[in-house]
Image (spheres, rainbow, N blue to C red):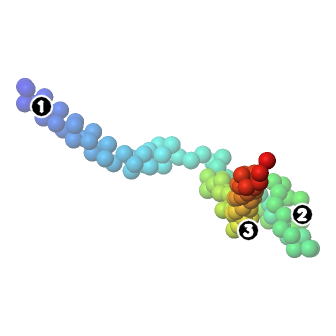
Amino acid sequence: MQSNSLVIVVVMSAIIGGAWMERDALKKYWDNHVNPPSQASQTTLYTWKDSEGTIHFSSHADDKHAKEVVVDTNKITPIESPPPSKKLEKEKNQSFVMDIRDENERTRKIIQAAKDKQTMPE
């Protein structure tokens, strides 16, 4: 009786351990087969090009040349902000250098005033 219980515990432990190691694959299976994506993930848009060559998009056909386009909204991701421009970075570095130069100039004037005060008799 105890050996049967031990075998059951070992088998259950192996199943749970295997499921834990394959949890990502099991989650994908669960998401795809048990919770299928809803049909609301698709949106219908209309697109057309005007006489000036500008492309327009709308939720309803505003032009007789509008073509229907189905967009899968599950594939839409946020746009990452672009990296800062090198010109802005260069201006920032130049500003930093100019601030250091100004601070050095103020310090030089203070030191010069102190030297002048020591050399001039009162």
For marks 1 and 3, the one nearer the N-term is 1
Is label 3 in a helix, a strand or a loop?
helix
Viewer-side residue, 84 vs 76: 84
SS category of the residue bearing label 1? helix
Residue type beneath disc 2: Asp
Looking at the rendered structure, which numbered label has been put on residue 87?
A: 3
- Left or right of 49? Residue 31 is left
Q: Give left or right: position of 25 versus 32.
A: left
Point 77% across, 51% down: residue: 121
Identify the residue position indicated by label 1 in the image.
6
Q: Quadrant of the N terminus?
A: top left
Q: CA distance from mark 3 to mark 2?
A: 43 Å
Residue topped by disc 2: 63
Q: Quadrant of residue 14?
A: top left
The image shows residue 71 at horizontal and vertical percentages of 69, 58
Depth check: give the residue in front, 117 or 18: 117
**Nearer-N-terminus badge (2/1):** 1
- Element on which disc 2 rests: loop
The residue lying toward the viewer, choosing from 13 and 63, is: 13
Using the image, tell me which numbered label, if any, was put on residue 114: none
Q: Is residue 85 above or below residue 33?
A: below
CA gap, disc 2 to disc 1? 74 Å
Q: Which amino acid is tagged 1?
A: Leu
Q: Residue furthest front?
A: 121
